[in-house]
Amino acid sequence: MATTSDMAPSRSKSGASRAANAAKAEAREQELEAQVAQLQADLKAISETLAKLTNDKVGEARSLATTEVKHLQAKGQQMLEEAQDQVGEAEKQLKDTIREKPLTAVAAAAGIGFIFALLTRH
């Protein structure tokens, strides 16, 4: 039969094994915590990089849009000025024609009025 003293060394080995396992588990836990911290730092760096890239692209798009708006405004202003010039020229020609041929102008105006009257009649 085994004595208590014979069993004691095996218990101490088992206790040492448990302590070693606990130490290994703690070391793995610390390693995992370090890896998680590194992942968090990497994610933060990626997020910051993406934010910078996004801000740069938004700035570029805003700048391009502003340039295009200014270009379109200038082009619209130019077209408006050209239209005003054409209307002014047509008005001048109409006035000259009326001065040269007043009876023809009155007859044309009466004819246009008569046509409008017929078209708007029920």
Image (cartoon, rainbow, N blue to C red):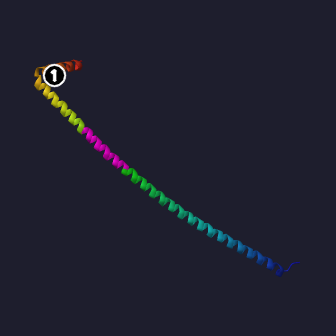
Residue assigned mark 1: 109
Q: Position of residue 87 (x, y in %)?
A: 20, 33
How many badges with numbers are in the image? 1
Residue 82 is left or right of residue 51, and the answer is left
Residue at 72% x, 73% y is: 18
Q: Residues within 10 Å of mark 1 (few under 14, many from 20)?
A: few
Q: Nearer the viewer, residue 16 or 38?
A: 38
Residue 17 is left or right of residue 84, and the answer is right
The C terminus: image quadrant: top left
The N terminus: image quadrant: bottom right
- Quadrant housing residue 105: top left
Residue 122 drawn in magenta: no
Q: Position of residue 119 (x, y in %)?
A: 23, 19
In the displayed structure, 64 sits above or below 4; it is above
Q: Position of residue 100 (x, y in %)?
A: 11, 24
Residue at 49% x, 59% y is: 47
Q: Secondary structure at mark 1?
A: helix
Q: Amino acid at mark 1?
A: Ala
Q: Position of residue 68 (x, y in %)?
A: 34, 46
- Quadrant housing residue 13: bottom right
Residue 85 is left or right of residue 102, and the answer is right
The range drawn in magenta is 64-80
Q: Nearer the viewer, residue 63 or 55?
A: 63
In the displayed structure, 4 sits above or below 51; it is below
In the displayed structure, 53 sits above or below 26; it is above
Which residue is the extreme one toward the bottom?
5
Q: Nearer the viewer, residue 18 or 24?
A: 24
Please tell me whether the stretch drawn in magenta is mainly helix, strand or loop.
Answer: helix
- Quadrant housing residue 36: bottom right
Residue at 53% x, 64% y is: 41
